[in-house]
Image (tube, grey):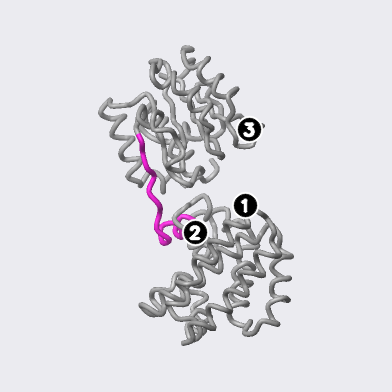
Amino acid sequence: MQNRHVDLICETHAFAELSRDARENLLKHAYVFESADFDALYTLAAAFVCVCEYGKADELHLKRVFDGSYLDIVKLPRAEKNGKMDVEDATYLTDTAYFTPTELSVKYYIVAAEEPLSEAVQNKLLKTLEEPPESSRFIIFSRGGDLLPTVTSRASVVRLEEFSVERIERALKENGADDVTAIMAAALGRGNIGAAEKAAKDEFTRNAYECATDFLLNVKRSPQILPAASKMIALKERLPAVLDCFELVLRDIAAYNSAGAEAIILKPAARDIIALSREFDTRTCIKLMPLIARARSRLRLYGNAASIIDQLLFSILEVKAKCPK
């Protein structure tokens, strides 16, 4: 079975809560699973189904869930919809939810739309949630705050907690990542095992970190910004990773300034972090964080990479100049 970090998910409070519902026969007809990490939510849903049906999340039945071989487990939206659930998908759910299951005790509908559900889709689902059939159970993924109160009020909300950097690092190592890749990806994941795993598999991750560190270490004057910006802009779709790495470096500098070397997350880069701490104090790091968040948001919304990166890099030097050590 492909490693989907089942052991990690089964250690969570969310899984313990769901297991208790199954064990004590307190299962609800509908659940909202909350997390930004939909990969982890799908593993949680798979483990939950296995516990409901077989009393445990064992490898054999988990594999069948992940392989999609249970006819009674329906994942929406359909693959061809590119993560967007439309009214057609919602209609399919409402029309088939009353069908008798063929193999499991109930039919399971897993609604895992990457884009927030529209109001029309949610209202379409609402009728079924208000008068749920005994033959079906619904699991709706949410990032939090993106569902109508009328929907969440008719479901049991289960929040999947974020994971510590150390726990994600250990999980990635168990999955074959080397030490440096594991800790870097874990730090970049921000408590999200799905994002961390993607970073660990992306061979560009280390280059993104080096790109951010190189700028902070070596660019001292405005004329040096244009070559550095051109280098970053050439990375195109990888720019969000570079911004994430800027943020990671600044967090480590602030941590070192406050608590010493033991507080540095990315220990293999400690030498660079200590060198940077001589030029960037905690106040400077704190002032730079919102600028990086703003650049990330603008990049996502507008996509004018050259303008966004130029402005960010000039702003870094400007803030640094105004906050001398």
Q: Residue at the spot x=48%, y=23% of the render?
A: 125
Residue type at numbered disc 2: Lys
* Residue position marked by numbered label 1 in the rendering: 301
The image quadrant that residue 150 belongs to is top left
Residue type marked 3: Ala
Q: Is residue 91 above or below residue 218?
A: above
Secondary structure under the numbered disc 2 in the rendered image: helix
Q: Name the residue located 69 percent from the left edge and 81 percent from the top edge.
A: 224
Q: CA distance from mark 1 to mark 2?
A: 35 Å
Q: Marks 2 and 3, Cα distance to the nearest angstrom?
A: 30 Å
Asked whether 257 or 224 is in front, the reply is: 224
Mark 1 crowd level (few <14, some 14–19, many ≥20, 10 Å Cα): few
**Residue under circle 3?**
79
Numbered mark located on residue 74 in the image: none
In the image, which disc is placed on residue 173?
2
Taking 258 as reference, is 239 left or right? right
**Residue 179, how many percent across, how many down?**
51, 66
User: Which element is circle 1 on?
Assistant: helix
Please report contact status of discs 1 and 2: CB closer than 8 Å, yes or no.
no
Q: Position of residue 203 (x, y in %)?
A: 64, 61
* Above-or-below relation of 94 to 274: above
For the record, the magenta segment spans 157-172
